[in-house]
Image (spheres, rainbow, N blue to C red):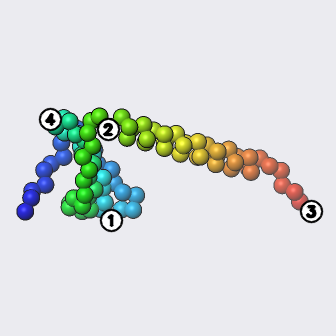
Amino acid sequence: MAIARPLPTTGSIFFDARGDDRALRVSWHHDVDLVVVSLWRDNVCSGSFRLTVEEVPALIELLRRGLDAAYAVAGARDDLHRADETRPLHVG
């Protein structure tokens, strides 16, 4: 049985919004020029992906574009909500 190695000092853990002890681990392995993204449930790794350091900028750019779009949608939703609050009510 393989022993799980501890998370390298350069990495992070993100917990799944669904809970259930699900997590995403991201760890840098500078000695082999890789970033490993792994999916965990409880203390069991259910899958991993090795991303070369050359591919990291493309992933970061994709996440940045998605975040920009999410902010734009949230801003538009807030603007619409504010407009509804300031609109006079018709009575009668």
Badge 2 is on which residue? 55
Badge 1 is on which residue? 20
Labelled disc at residue 50:
none
Which amino acid, mark 2? Glu
Labelled disc at residue 92:
3
> Dot 2 surroundings within 10 Å: few (below 14), some, or many (20 or more)?
few
Q: Secondary structure at mark 3?
A: loop
> Dot 4 surroundings within 10 Å: few (below 14), some, or many (20 or more)?
few
> Dot 3 surroundings within 10 Å: few (below 14), some, or many (20 or more)?
few
Sequence order check, earlier mark of 4 and 2: 4
Q: Residue 38: x, y in percent? A: 26, 52
Sequence order check, earlier mark of 4 and 3: 4
Which amino acid, mark 3? Gly
Which mark lies nearer to you, 2 or 1?
2
Q: Residue 20: x, y in percent? A: 33, 65
| Horizontal arrangement in the rendering, residue 37 relative to residue 18 (left or right) | left
Sequence order check, earlier mark of 2 and 3: 2
Q: Secondary structure at mark 2?
A: loop
Residue 11 visible somewhere in the drawing: no
Which part of the image, by quadrant, shows the N terminus? bottom left
Badge 4 is on which residue? 31
Quadrant assignment, res 16: bottom left
Sequence order check, earlier mark of 1 and 3: 1
